[in-house]
Image: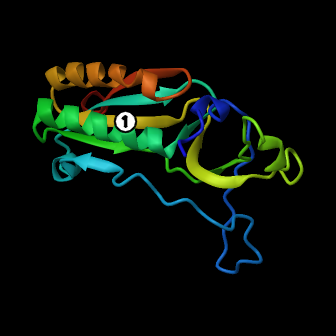
Amino acid sequence: MALRRSNSYSKKHVVPYTRTSKKKQRAYVKVVPPAKIVKFTMGNLKAYREGKFPKCLIMIVDERVQIRQNALEAVRQFVNKKLDSVMKDQYLFKVIPYPHHIQRENKMLTGAGADRMQTGMQLSFGRPIAKAAILNKGDRVFSIYTGTDKNIVSARAILKQIYSKVPGIKKIVYEDKSLVS
């Protein structure tokens, strides 16, 4: 069965549902969906540590929002592929939030005869279906570090392409660490 639409969850105010324990009786969450995000840091980490990437673009959310892990993974794959084709190992791309919050769904059947197969709102707590990252206003989502102004222009264009894949109101902020020192 396909995932439920993200607008069912993305802007809802939620209490984080994350409690897992090695002892099953103490755990609120009995089953945790597997992680879908493979890597959180891509690109040339060695050059970043040496200080060769002083220029940085950061995507920040401007409202409280939930971002599902499958949305983060889709954006990660898209951005990394584009950056790799444009900048050829002259960048560092980071996915900052880690999805801890476990989303639940009370599956409801529709159609003829569906009334005999479900309990409605009785025992409606729901089963775990996915994980999401809960972000507050001003939290960072993605960051791209690079060394030249030409790469910053192309990185900004790539970040603008992912606006529709990430829920909520977002903005892109530029930082230059070479001007600070």
- The local secondary structure at tag 1 comes to helix
Q: Quadrant of residue 94?
A: top left
Pointer 1 local density, CA inside 10 Å: few below 14, some 14–19, many at least 20: many
Q: Residue 21 placed where, x, y %? A: 67, 74
Closer to the camera in the image, 144 or 2: 2
Q: Residue 88 placed where, x, y %? A: 10, 37
Q: Residue 133 placed where, x, y %? A: 56, 45
Is residue 35 in sight in this rendering?
yes
Residue at 38% x, 25% y is 162
Placement of the C terminus among the 4 image quadrants? top left
Query: Where is mark 1, residue-wise?
Result: 75
Q: Identify whether 80 is placed above or below 63.
A: below
Q: Identify whether 13 is placed above or below 99.
A: above
Closer to the camera in the image, 142 or 120: 120
Closer to the camera in the image, 109 or 165: 109
Q: Which residue is farthest right?
A: 122
Horizontally, residue 94 falls left or right of residue 126, namely: left
